[in-house]
Amino acid sequence: MNFRNKKLDESNRSDNLGIDITTYIDNKKSSISSSNLLDDNLKTLIEKCVDTTKNTPEDEYNSLPDKDLLAKKIRDLNLYDETHLENEKKIEYLQKLEESAAVNKKIVNTESSFSENKSNFILANSEDFCNGYKTSSFSASSVTVAQDGQSMERDYEYSSKCHLKDMRSAEDLGKMAANQTIKKLNPKKIGSEKISIIFDKRIAKGILSIFANAISSSAISRGTSFLKNKIDTKIFSDSINIFDKPDITKGLGSRSFDAEGVKTDTLKLVEQGVLKHYLVDTYNGRKLNLKSNGRSGGTSNLYFDKGKINYKELLNSHSRSLYITETIGHGSNIVTGDYSVGATGFLIENGEFKYPINEITIAGNFKEMFQNITLANDLEFEYSTNSPTMMIEGMIVAGK
């Protein structure tokens, strides 16, 4: 459901039921999917999938996961909330959100949304594995546009939880989006320089997502990652630890098994700066001569362990730095490690936010960036990928 400028703009509902079938014949594999679950159609699907598999080229790495790796116990991680919010309640929530976002007269445009999703995933294979789990999510977002004279800026805030009662209140969400937008008004330009950059949490978690892409077994097996052959190599500073923890209660990325049915356990991906694991699925694991560690489909709840200094100390760690609240474009190259994106944020002097800045490009290479990360101790589990506030020293800024 969407609101725009305090009026209902759109309301949608969709129900999806589908099946994916994968067949293996020796080292041949093919898949087929359908939303028609009638018996006659399923029989036809299976016949077509088998016929297709027979005519597919062999690949020595195709196979089901090893039977001893399949999940045997399904943990109750409290991922499903049976609560259903009627449209009237969603409208009431969004009305409060819009009112809160538009209190300041500098806010000239608002847009908000609320969504409720329920899913039931079941996986079965010919190794006698058959299990599943339910998940739910409730999400709300607020996007605001502020204007002051000739200056017009946009920002946002959102909340997403497995359980409705854990959602941020409509009033808080609207107020946060509006305040963040108004702070960006009348930005200034700065010159080019080499400077320490502090990444807001929602940007810092994006850096962590790039790291996850670079250690995926698919990228490693193809040789398209700058972290190839880096297991047991120090790629971060001593203070950095990175976890992927699938068993967090009510975690947005939590699960008892991966997309292949392989059990999932907590991985300490980076320990005191040293890379310990790749994210391994069955197919690419066989290419790399590694066993699957339950990461088919990617990470679960991925996070940097919190740092040792508080947020204020991080701001005060340099007399002059930049605080980035938004990046623009997709300027990450995991083959070379190069990083270059447009950005907006604030200039910080002696720990204080001086004024907003825009139209800059920040650049570096992850090989050096990872070594120069300092993390605050303000880690919160708001998303499936989370990071404390992050500072990276010695980055290049291109300005006016």
Image: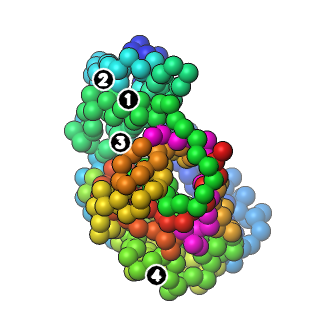
Q: Say whether disc 4 or disc 2 marks the residue closer to the N-terminus.
A: 2
Q: Which is nearer the eye, 273 or 54? A: 273
Q: What residue span does the magenta drawing correspond to?
A: 355-369
Q: Which residue is mark 1?
A: 178
Please report contact status of discs 2 and 1: CB closer than 8 Å, yes or no: yes
| Secondary structure at numbered mark 2 | helix
At 52% from the left and 41% from the top, the residue drawn is 357
Q: How many marks?
A: 4
Please report contact status of discs 3 and 2: CB closer than 8 Å, yes or no: no
- Is the residue marked by circle 3 packed among few (<14), some (14-19), or many (20+) residues within 10 Å? many
Q: Say whether disc 2 or disc 1 marks the residue closer to the N-terminus.
A: 2
Left or right: residue 312 versus residue 385 is left
Residue 268 at what x, y percent from top left?
A: 39, 75
Distance in Å between CA atoms under marks 3 and 4? 32 Å
Residue 330 at what x, y percent from top left?
A: 63, 50
Left or right: residue 29 versus residue 11 is right
Point out which mark residue 160 bears: 3
Q: Which residue is mark 2?
A: 100
| Secondary structure at numbered mark 1 | helix
Residue 253 appearing in the image: no
- Is the residue marked by circle 2 packed among few (<14), some (14-19), or many (20+) residues within 10 Å? some
